Each structure stands twice: as structure tokens, then as C-alpha cells.
Amino acid sequence: MRFRSSKWFLAVTVAQFWVSAMLVIHGLFMLISANTVGWLAERQSTLKPTYLFGLLLLYAGTITFALGSHPYLLAVARVLQGASAGTVFTAGMSLLVAGIDRDELGRWLGLVFTGLTAGITFAPLLGGIIYANAGYLAVFAVALVANTIAFVLGLLCVDPKRRQQSNMDETAQRDYGTISHGQPKGQVSSDTSSVNAMRGYDDEERFLIKPSRDRFREPADKEPSFLMRYFPSTTILLRSPRVLAAIYGTLLQVSLLTSFDSILPLFVERTFNWESLASGAIFMALALPSVFGGMAGTLSDKFGARVVVLVGFVLSSVMIALMFVMLALEAKPLHSDQAFQGIGTALMLSPLAADISLAAEQLEKEHEGIFGQNGPDSQAYGLFNSAHAAGTVLGPAFAGAVYDKAGWNVAVWALAGLCASGIPVVIFHDI
């Protein structure tokens, strides 16, 4: 009996190791690929091939995972899936932002994150239903069909950068630069103005060369640092307090959203003897408010990201702190508490994603020519997705370690304090 118990303990320990390893591998290669895409964007005329390549990586990862029968093969699959996630997310968001009016940036990014959260929430449920009724391989067949649809839509997509360049070329041929045949001298072509508006410039800034407001340029008599010589765009972004605030807010939001994955199922099972279906309902309560992502983005477009993100951090901090009373109240308000937490986290991500793009755009005006042909969005979203990937690893690891060592109440207060640390960052930095 002792031998059998030892074998069971060894099997559980090995399984826990590989589950944790798969999460770390996915997050690590998502981080690497996101920054690689940002670096390549400076040297490419378009990111559409990169986006399609990311989907091909997902094909390879899905097939490897479906056919793999050894943990090492599954680890290879997670490498491919993580690289695909970072590539598709960074290139896709850059392509999207390039074709969106800046006044509507938050709203459209809110819709993107609504879809992302819906996929993360409902995919396990859908996969379980398919597995129960059609078997193991049928789950991956559905995933490959969905990937094929995404690939076809990517092929049909028109790259906004190419469209803008085409419009500018047509305008130049028709109007001899910026002066139309039928326009009075000095009047700027409307087509060129619209292209400039898409890039975030007004006509005065576009055609009148102004002194740079560069706060980060190295002094003329000082040799540029190693980072400025080899990674100038990333260095400039990371020197901006506004960009750092958005990255830190993203790291907190994703860490909080994923931290309960590692402790909440264990807590409700050990404390209230809940089964898997009841535990899943809690996560549904946390995820369903993500449908407000588009609304949060619209509010940030109208009132600015600072107010919306601040409300999100305050609401989430309070609701997480209140979870320590669940032991006394027998979990009756747990679902409503998670729903309010979901609203708080939904108010953070799309405004932060929009603000990092606006901050990068401002830096591009101050550092003309530094960010390459595709502008700063790819590098900015590479850093944004790095924070996202880091949060998926650090959140569950931090919450799980505290819960195992100190229990539920300490873990909840630690997460509430972590969430509250975003409040002064939002208040005292120009988000």
C-alpha cells in the first residue's frame, strides 16, 4: 500500500511539473516572438506576411500537439504555439491599429480583447463537449478549421500601410507633390491630408519642419549607449514613463486575471466541496464582463485612459480584498464578487492597449525616422504582449506560492495589494 501511494504521489508530482512547464514554455516563447516581430517591423515594408507566418506556426503547433504522445513532443508543440501567439498578436494588432482612426482606437481594441477573452473562456468548455461526443482528435480538427478561417481572412486583408502608400503615390502623380492642378496655390490635397491624419499628423506638423522635442536624445558630445546604438526604438519606448506605466498596468491586469486559475478551484473544492462544474461557473462570472471591453475602450476614447483604468484598478482592488470574507459567508456572494472583479479588469486592458499606441505615436514625432517603415506600433505592441505573456506565468505562480505557504486570506490580501500598486502608477503618470 505504501508502494502504491508512493507511485501515485510520484505520478501527480510529475504531472504537476509538466503542466507548469507547459505554461512557462508558452509564455517564454510568446515573449520572445512578440519582441522579435517588433524588431523585424523596422526592417519590413509590411507585416502581413509575418501575421500569416504566425498562423502557419499555429498549424504546426496544433498538429504536433494532436499527434504527440511524449511530454517532449508536447513541449515542442507549446514552443510553436507560444511563438505563434506572440507573432499573430503583435503583427495583428499593428495591422489593425494602422487602419484605425485614433479617435476610435480604444473602441476597436476593446472589441479585440472581448474576442480574446471569449476565446480563452469558452474554448475549454467547447473542447470538453467535442471531446466527450467525438473524441480526442476531433478537438484538434475543429481548431484547425478555425485556424484555416483565420488564415483565409488574413489573405483577404488589405494592409493599411500599402493602401496609404498607394494613395500617396496616386496623389503625387496627379497633383505634382501636394499641389493639385485645380487647387489654389498653397492648398493641401485632401487625399494627402487624410493619409497624414491616419498616421496621426496634422498638415502643419507634416509639412513644416519643427525643432525636435526629443527628451531622450543623447548629447552631441556623448557617445550613444550600447542600447541606443543597437536597439534605439525599444530603448526610446522603455525610457518613456507613459509607456512603462501602460506595460506595468498590463502586467498587473493579466497577472490578476490568471492568478485565480491556480488557487480558486482548490479553495472552493477544499472549503465547500464544489465540483468542477460549480468551479467553472465562477470563472464564467469573472470572464463574462469582458463583453464590456468595447465600452471601456469607447469611454477611454472620450474621457482618456487614466480615468477608466483608475476605476478598474480601484474596483478590482476592493473586490479582491473582500474575498477574504468568503470563508465566513459560505461563498454565497462569490459569483457576484467575481463578476465585479471581471468588470474592473475589463476596464483596464483596452484603454492601456490604446494608450501605449498613442504614447508611441508621440515618441515617433519626437524621433523622426527611428522607428522604421512601419512606425512604432509593432515595437510598442511587442512590449505590450511581453507584459501579457509574463502575466500569464507570474500571476498563477505568485498566487499559488502564497496560497500554499500562507493560506487563502493572505493570498487574497497579497493579490489585492498587488492590484492596488497600479493605482499610484495611473495617478502620477501621464496615461
Image: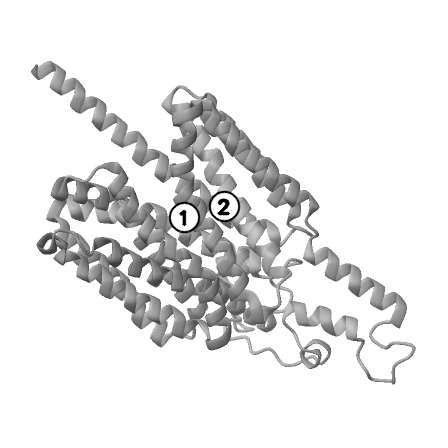
Measure the C-alpha gap from mark 2 to mark 1: 8 Å
Residue 182: percent from the left, percent from the top? 91, 79
Relative to the observer, which residue lies in front, 245 or 81?
A: 81
Please identify the quarter of the rendering in which residue 220 is found: bottom right
Q: Are marks 2 and 1 in contact (CB under 8 Å)?
A: yes
How many labels sit on residues? 2
Q: As drawn, is 407 to the left or to the right of 292?
A: left
**Amino acid at the residue labelled 2:** Gly
Q: Residue at x 31, y 33 (%)?
A: 19
Identify the image's colour scheme: rainbow, by chain, secondary structure or one colour: one colour
Residue 358: percent from the left, percent from the top? 53, 69
Q: Which residue is mark 2?
A: 86
Callout 1: 10 Å neighbours few (<14), some, many (20+)? many
Which part of the image, by quadrant, shows the C terminus?
bottom left
Which part of the image, by quadrant, shows the N terminus?
top left
Residue 166: percent from the left, percent from the top? 79, 59
Q: As drawn, is 287 to the left or to the right of 134?
A: left
> SS of the residue at dot 1?
helix
Name the outermost residue toward the right.
181
User: In the rendered structure, which disc, 2 or 1, sits on the residue that comes first in sequence?
Assistant: 2
Q: Is residue 57 visible in this depiction of the protein?
A: no
Establish if 243 lies above or below 127. below
Q: Residue at x 78, y 75 (%)?
A: 190
Q: Residue at x 67, y 72 (%)?
A: 197
Q: As drawn, is 317 to the left or to the right of 64?
A: left
Q: Which residue is mark 1?
A: 389
